[in-house]
Image (cartoon, coloured by chain):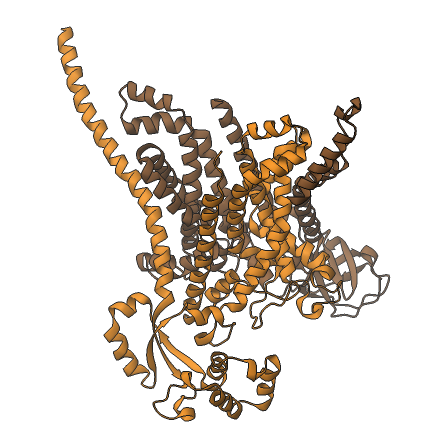
Chain colours: A brown, B orange
Amino acid sequence: MTDLSQSQTAQGAAASEQPTAAGSLRRKRRIGEVIIQSFLFLCGFLSIFITMGIVYELGKESLLFFGSRQWENSNKPITQRIEVDTTQFAVSTSGFTLDIEDLIRVDEELMLITGLDETLVTVERGFDGSEAVAHNAGAVIEIATEATLREFFTTTQWNPQIGQFGIWALATSTLLTSAIAVVVALPLGLATAVYLSEYASQKARNTLKPILEILAGVPTVVYGYFALTFMTPLLRSIFGKDVVAIYNTASAGIVIGILILPLVSSMSEDALSAVPRSLREAAYGLGATRLETAVKVVVPAAFSGIVAAFIVAVSRAIGETMIVAIAAGAGPAFTFNPFQSAETMTGHIVRISGGDLSYDSLDYNSIFAIGLMLFFMTLALNIFSQRIVRRFREVYE
Amino acid sequence: MSTATQHTSREQFSSNLERRHRVGRIWFLLFQASMVVGIVALTVLLLNIANSSFGYVAFHYGNPPEEFVGEGVDIEAAPKEDLIAILQDNISPGLFARFESERSFSSRSQANVYDLVLDYVLVPEIDAQWSLLQSLNQRDEIQAQVGAEFPDSIVEFQSWVDYDFIRSPQSSFVEIAGVRTAIFGSLWTIGIAILFAFPIGVGAAIYLEEYAGDSLINRVIRTNINNLAGVPSIIYGILGLAIFVRALEPFTSGSVFGIGDPTTSNGRTILSAGLTLGLLVLPLIIINAQEAIRAVPSSLRQASYGIGATRWQTTWNHVLPVAMPGIMTGTILAISRAIGETAPLVVIGASTFIQVDPDGPFSKFTTLPIQIFQWTARPQNVFRNLAAAASLTLLGLLLSLNASAILMRNRFRRRL
């Protein structure tokens, strides 16, 4: 403050020095103002930089993940000695089956299979820059597995260490917990919003809304504790201990539903309150009851706002981490049974990174690939909801 | 003929009206019930935590106090010199020397020495614990059960969250474990997050509200901030891991400045955690500050421009002072979100067991939510009580933060 008053007096002094100069009224170039404006612009621009940072880092490490090659023992030894220039050799019948185009590794040398005739394999030697050397009979053949986008999206087993890269093992449980959360939160949240906006008195609204907002402010790790120590035992006492596992997606999903309930109710309530009063009065004038006004006039008028609230809530449920990390269980499982333990995408990231994670390992790269998918899922939902809100605004302004 | 139809339609109407009102009443009850569900959920959540935070415990000492001070004497009230003597007689000289070098015994308080005696000499072991509800309803059963199963044990009503719990550092002994290091870790990370995010966030909000026109780049920035606010927090954790922990390791572990202990922390320091949380709350601070600035009436700006003030003078002297209470409230709300964040800190690698207070931005850290997570994830039931007590502490911290936000808003609100 003192700086400013000084600068103001300084300006006053400057003005009094040349009171007659006509140029003194012209706009001055003020270096300070330009610097400040540039600094403020940089602050705003940092947000773009953060987004680019997220996309770049996630993308870079994901590319490493998708390019990574894992070697798996095929339990198929070669049956004769291979000289440096042999391109055809016999293998034992045991172990995995080989295919044309498969990349195999014998000792340190990579070979590409070009022909296959029962146990007789034709290969291209010294593939990918490796050195062609002689191998003794009994050397083990290892088969390469690569994480490809196709495998990532079409298979259902996740265990990168042995070459299983099916994201659906994790994605299904994310979808399952989110679906349960949505089933809990949407009807309750919408009904709460209708009650608050259409039925409750001003006084009741002023007390009830902050109470619901407390629910939204409780840290998610506390919800996780709640899911594990209250919801799970409750479910187990209702459905039986042999039906419900200790760690299960149902318990996590229901508690996520409680977490996003205030989000749904408060955003929907905003949308409902934004509906002009004249619409309600017209409905009452036609003899509609309070329920009919609410359900047939106000809710349809606020529909896009409510849909936007739902989408934001779904995106929040998908990204929710601690509740599922605590209550949904460890270990990927491709299951649609809500009473069984299944690890979600976020839960997997937490478990993998909770241990000692070494850089550039497969696990390290895999969390970036999962994170990238999570980022795009929530980003798509958020952009979609913003589009809907923007359309909604156009209706009443 | 026409009167007959009128007659029936009126009858239909009134019976219909009754039905409509009935349906209306039923739905009203349903709406009210859904409202109640939310409140019930909150109540059950709080009760559930309180239920595990208090209750009876049965415990016995590995070495009973009578061996050291005689029957009927309260060892907790024994003079400090006696306690030091007990400690010296019963632990290895090396350990005693380590305590002395950590902090000399002459400068330690009696309570502190007692903690060491409790920890290393008496070694209390918990046999069983009961929840608050059980403790209130089944007092006699508990006494009988302890008498039968653990005849040597002492039954005591324990408040898991108390002054000792907040004051003590972490310990592998449940009986004396506390959250002191975790609270310090939380405060340090949050402090760094505020220092980083507040100036940048308010700057960005000023730019967007006072300077930015409707150009393409400004529209992109606006949309982008809204999208960033919706990014799951764990993504920020992954970003923090890649940038602060890995790429900027020399900086975040302090080796650039020649301080810190790079061999142990590997960039997984308070500084990395604070910056990560800073990135996380930045969009929230920007959005809240934007709203506060937008709420300043434009007549104020026009009056300022009218007397010849520049844009920055107007902003600094007139807009910001009026908007500041709103900005502070929004920032405190954003900060209370950051205090409860767990996932990003797990990803960037919070340490789980830390006994010494963090001594700067380059030390390893743990935070309250991390402690709750760790204790909840343990299979032994007794750690659940610690998790509940830590949750209660965290909720208390958040409640006081939010209360201060409301107070600040009421106190500094200027009438315009």
Quarter of the image for residue B135 reads bottom left
Q: In screen coordinates, is A253 left or right of A348?
A: left
Residue B172, placed above or below residue B370 = below
What residue appears at the point 47 percent right and 67 percent down from the top-left corner? Answer: B375
Quarter of the image for residue B144 reads bottom left
- On the question of residue A45 being in view, the answer is no
Residue B341, placed above or below residue B89 = above
What residue appears at the point 28 percent right and 39 percent down from the top-left corner? Answer: B30
Query: Of all residues shown, which one is farthest toward the top?
Result: B1
- On the question of residue A78 being in view, the answer is yes
Q: In screen coordinates, is B388 left or right of A351?
A: left
What residue appears at the point 48 percent right and 48 percent down from the top-left corner? Answer: B405
Q: Position of residue A104 (x, y in %)?
A: 73, 59
- Foreground: A123 or B10? B10
Q: In screen coordinates, is A95 left or right of B73?
A: right
Quarter of the image for residue B245 reads bottom right
Residue B367, placed above or below residue A37 = below
- Foreground: A6 or A221? A6
- Foreground: A228 or A198? A198
